[in-house]
Image (cartoon, helix red, strand yellow):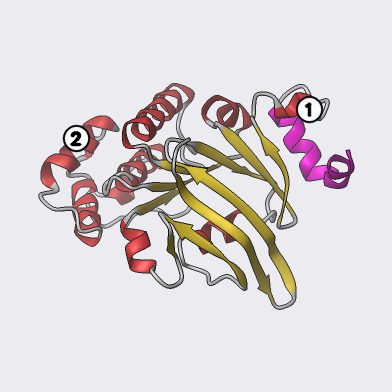
Amino acid sequence: MAEKVLSVNKLQKVFGGIVAVNDISFEVAGGEIVGLLGPNGAGKTTTINMILGVITPTAGTVRVNGMDIVTSRSKVLERTNFTAAYTPLPGNLTVYQNLHIFALLYGVKNSGPHINALLERFDLKKFRNTKCGVLSSGEQTRVGLAKAMLNNPDLLLLDEPTASLDPAIARDIRANIRSFVTSRDCAVLWTSHNMHEVAAVCDRVLFLSHGNILLEGDPKTLPRQHQKADLEDLFIQVAREPLSLKEG
């Protein structure tokens, strides 16, 4: 069995009396891609922010490679990376400048060849000296993914990683991420509203509803267990009638 990279135990976050994340526990192993799913407001972003150490949990623990994110944040973040469509890189810097600066921040030594390989990997060579602010949203998404792989992380957090990409490029990016995960034995937590993508790429999924883990399982078999045709139908019921699933 692969070693657990991410361990979340009884994690809770309360904002002014409102429970955003309610006592959730899960693990992600090396080489595993786990989908963190749910409607807006389910607690996904809050969970990711606690894993990144951006938000301090009200209760519970997050451990990466056995290290607690609260007490060993710097060491954890050296082995972690993240990208999201809503966190674009500085627009006044070129693609190469952005990657070079983030390589310095992550302590990547002799980063030039590694950056060039990532530019090739994500079809960004022609944008090497282009400012990120003038790139299309899809091109910025690819730069963000290149940034996320700069430090060869043990834990990769991907929030809508193929947003704004056309279907052909999105398919190539999914294959690219899968290849990276396999070669590095990296653990991935992947959020998406594209259920067809999730079914294609994730080994396991967790459905959040009102801060609780409502369902967990294999995305290919979980819908049938709840009398749904596919993952999209299951997502819709989680969003509309979560109690009926919990009771069922």
Task: Tell me the quarter of the image containing the C terminus.
Answer: top right
- Residue 157 seen anywhere in this rendered image of the structure: yes
Give the main secondary structure, helix, strand or loop, of the magenta stretch: helix
Q: Is residue 138 left or right of residue 47?
A: left
Q: Which residue position is annotated with label 2?
A: 117
Residue 148 in percent (x, y) is at: 34, 47
Say what amino acid the circle numbered 2 marks: Ala
Disc 2 crowd rating (10 Å Cα; few below 14, some 14-19, many 20+) is some
Say what amino acid the circle numbered 1 marks: Gln
The question of residue 63 being in magenta is answered with no
Q: Secondary structure at mark 1?
A: helix
Where 22 falls versus 182 (above or below)?
below
For discs 2 and 1, the disc positioned in front in the rendered view: 1
**Residue 210, numbered circle:** none
**Where is residue 196 shown, x and y percent of the image?**
60, 26
What residue sits right under mark 1 in the picture? 225
x, y (%) of residue 12?
Answer: 65, 66
Residue range corresponding to the magenta coloring: 231-248
Query: Would residue 123 be seen by someone viewing this image from the given angle?
Result: no
If you read the primary sequence from the N terminus, does the residue marked by circle 2 or circle 1 appear first?
2
Q: How many C-alpha atoms fall within 10 Å of the one at disc 1: few (<14), some, or many (≥20)? A: few
Contact, CB < 8 Å: mark 2 with mark 1? Answer: no
Cα–Cα gap, marks 2 and 1: 43 Å
Residue 172 spot, x, y in % from top left? 39, 24
